Image: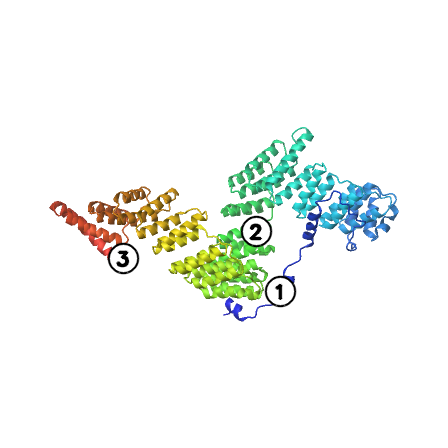
Amino acid sequence: MLIPCDCFLHVPAPPLTPLQNSTASAPCRDKGLTSQINSVYAPARTYEICPELTVPCTVARHTGKGKKKSNWVHYGGLLPAMLEALEDVQDVGEALWPWKDTLSNRERTIVLKEQKDWRRAVEIFDWFRRERGHELNVIHYNVVLCTVGRARRWDLVLNLWHEMHSCGVAPDNSTYGTLINVCCKGGGERATLLWLGDMCKRGLMPDEVTMSIVLQALKKAGEYEMAELFFRKWSSDSSGRMEGHPHYSLYTYNNLIDTYGKASQLEKVSDTFNQMLKEGVAPSVVTFNTMIHVWGTHHRMERVSSLVRMMEEFQCFPDTRTYNILISLYRESNNIDVAEYYFWKMKAENLIPDVVSCRTLLYGYSIRGMISKAEALLKEMDERGFLIDEYTQSALTRMYVNAGMLEQAWHWFDRFHHQMNSECFSANIDAFVEKGYIVLAEKAFIHCLKKKMLSVSVCNVMIKGYGLVDKLDEACEVADGMERYGILPDYVTYSSLIQLLSTAKLPKKALHYLKKMQSVKLLSDCVPYSVVISSFAKNSDLGMVEYLFREMITSGIRADVFLYSILIDAFAEVGKVQQAAAYFGLMKKDGLCESATIYNSLIKLYTKVGYVAEARETYKLLRSLDTDTNLYASNCMIDLYSDHCMVKEAREIFESLKARRSANEFSYAMMVCLYKKIGRYDVAHRICKEMQALGLMTQALSYNSAIQIEFMEIIYTCVDPVRSLQVVQFTGGTLLIGFCKLRSLED
C-alpha cells in the first residue's frame, strides 16, 4: 500500500507557488480602513479640495420598479415623479430637468436617501454640487456619508469629509453619529474612536444611539474598561444636562449588559438588569438571550434556569436563538439530557430548529458516543438539507472510531473528504491516530495529499501518530519531506520529534533535529534542549550534557528550574557533588526559585556521599516550601541517619511521616534496619508487625529484615522457655510466609 512516506520520498513534489501569488492582496475594505485611520487624525483644517467625487462605473438600471413606486407614494407631491424619473433615465440632469429650479432641501434629501446604490447617490450628489441654486447642507452630506460608508468606500468618506470643511459646512452630531456607525459596522473600531475624539474636541456630545455604537466598538476591540469609563462620563454629562437621572433605552441597557458580561463583571450585569426593571423598561427577548448567555458562560446554570422562568413571567417568549443558547450551554456543561429537552421543547413551541440547533446537539451526541441518537438526528438533517460543518463532521468520525466502528468511521470520512479543508483533515487523522489506527490515518493522509490540502498541522498529527505506534523512522520521513511540498516545519514539528526520539533513548537523532530547529531560528526557549539533555543524562553521557548546556547558554537561551533539576539530578546520580553544587549556584544566580525537585536531587546526592550537615540543611529548606512532595527526601534522610546510627533524628522524621500517613514500605524498612543495626530487636520486631498489619511487606528488603528480626527475637527470648515457645509459635507461620514470598520475589 502507498504510505505517506512513499509520497514524500518518491513522488515529485508539486511546484511551489511563487511568492507573489502566495500572499493574497489585502481586501479593499482593509485598505480603505487603513487609509481612514491614517487620515482621520487631521480632519480639522487640512483643506483638501475635492472638486468632484469619482464614481468608478455607471450604475446599471434595475427592473422590478412596481414595488418601489408603491413605496414612494407616501411622500406625496412631486417626489414620486422625481424618483421614478431617476429610476427610468440614466442621465441625472435629464431626469431632474423639470424640477431643477424648484427642488427644495427636503426633496434633495429624500432623493439622495432613496438611492439604494451608492454610485447612483454619488452621481446625484455631484449633479447637485455642479448645478447653481442647489445648496447642499449638512443633512445632505450626512445622507451620502451614510450611503458610501455602508458600501465601505472609505476613500469617498474622507473626500466628503474634507469637502465639507472646504465648503464651510460644519459637521453636527448626526454627522459624527453616521461616521461612527459606519466605521463600527465596517470593522474599523480604531477609526470609530478617532471620530469620537474629534467630536468631543468640537464640544459635541454623543446622543444615546451614538454612545451605544461607541460601546459596541469598544466591546469589539476588547476594551471593556474603557467602555465602562466612557459610559460613566457620558452618563454623568447627560445627568448634568437633563437635571436628573437619565433614562436609557432598551437598546442601551442590552448593550451595557452585554459589555459587562463580556468583561466578566457579573455584579454589574445584575445591577444594570435590576435598574432597567426599576425604571420600568421591559426586557426583550434580546435582553434575556444576553443574560442567559452571560450567566451560562460563567457556569451559573441556576441563574440560567431562573431567567428562563422569568421570561415566562414577563410573557417574553423564547425565540430560536434562545433555544440555541440553552442547547449550547447545557451541552457544554455536560448535561446533554437538558440540552435535548430544549431541542424538543423548541419543536413543541412550533419553532423549527435551524442548522445551528441541529449542529450543536449533534456535536454533543458525537463527543459522548451517543451513536443511535446522533444517527437519528443526522437523518433529520439530511432530509432538511442541512450541511454538516467541519467540527461536527470530525467529531462524528471520532465517535465511530472510539466505538471501534471503523467501517462506519471510514465511510463517514470518505463521504465528506472532498469538501474538507486542511484543519478538518487534521482533526479526522487525529481521530484515527489517537486509537492507534495508523493504516486508516495513512489512507486519510494520502487523500489530503491528493486534494492538495497538506499543511503543517496535518504533518504534525501524522508525526504524532507514528510516534504513538513507535514508527519513529516514518515520523522522521514525514518531517523531512515537508519542505518538498512547500511546507515549513514549525516549533511543534521539531519539538514532537525531539520528544519522541529522546524518549526512545535516541538522543543523537534528537540532537540532529535540535540543530535543524536552531538553524531555522525556532528555538525560543530551553524546553527542546531540556528533553535532549535529559536523554543524554539517562544514557550517563554527562560530557554531552555539559556541552549542550554550555551551547544553549552561549546561544542566549536561559535555563529554567526544570532544566537545572535535570542537571543536578544527573550529577547527583553519580555522586559528583562539585558539579551538582555548581549548577545549583548557577540557578540561584539566575534568580530562579528553588523547587522541591531541586532539593530532592541535592538530598539524594548528599545521601549518596554521606554529607549529613548539607543534607540536613537542604531538608530544612525543603520543609520550608510547605509542600507534600517530600516523601522521597524524608526517606533519603532516614537512610542517611540510619547509616550514621542517628536514631533520634531518624525517628523524628519517621514519626512525622506516620502522623501525616505518608510513610511507605521504604520508610518502615529503613527504620527496621536502623534498630537492627543498634541491637534494638524488640523495636525492630514491633515495626515489622506494624508493616505486616498495614500490608507493606512487598519488597525483598522488607522480608529479609523481617526474617532476620524473627530469628534474633527467638534467640533473644530463649532464656525464658514459656516466652520462647510463644515466639516460636508466632514466628513459625510468619517465617514460612516470609520465605515463600521472598522466594516469589526472587523468581
Q: Nearer the viewer, residue 554 or 427?
A: 554
Task: Give the CA distance from mark 2 to mark 1.
Answer: 39 Å
Q: What's the residue type where badge 2 is placed?
A: Cys
Q: Which quadrant of the view contains residue 237?
A: top right
**What's the mark number on residue 17?**
1
Asked whether residue 429 is in view, the answer is no
Q: Secondary structure at mark 1?
A: loop
x and y percentages locating residue 163 in the rendered image: 78, 46
Q: What's the residue type where badge 1 is placed?
A: Thr
Q: Which residue is mark 2?
A: 358
As drawn, is 106 to the left or to the right of 664? right
Nearest to N terminus: mark 2 or mark 3 = 2
Task: Give the CA distance from mark 2 to mark 3.
Answer: 59 Å
**What's the mark number on residue 208?**
none
Nearest to N terminus: mark 2 or mark 1 = 1
The quadrant of the rendering that contains the C terminus is: bottom left
**Residue at 41 percent of width and 61 percent of height:** 504
Number of other residues with Cα within 10 Å of mark 3, as a class: few under 14, some 14 to 19, many 20 or more: few
x and y percentages locating residue 302 in the rendered image: 51, 39
Q: What's the residue type where badge 3 is placed?
A: Leu
**Residue at 67 percent of width and 39 percent of height:** 211
Q: Which quadrant of the view contains residue 229?
A: top right
x and y percentages locating residue 422 in the rendered image: 57, 60
Number of other residues with Cα within 10 Å of mark 2, as a class: few under 14, some 14 to 19, many 20 or more: many
**What's the mark number on residue 745?**
3
From the viewer's perspective, is the residue at label 2 or at label 3 nearer? 3
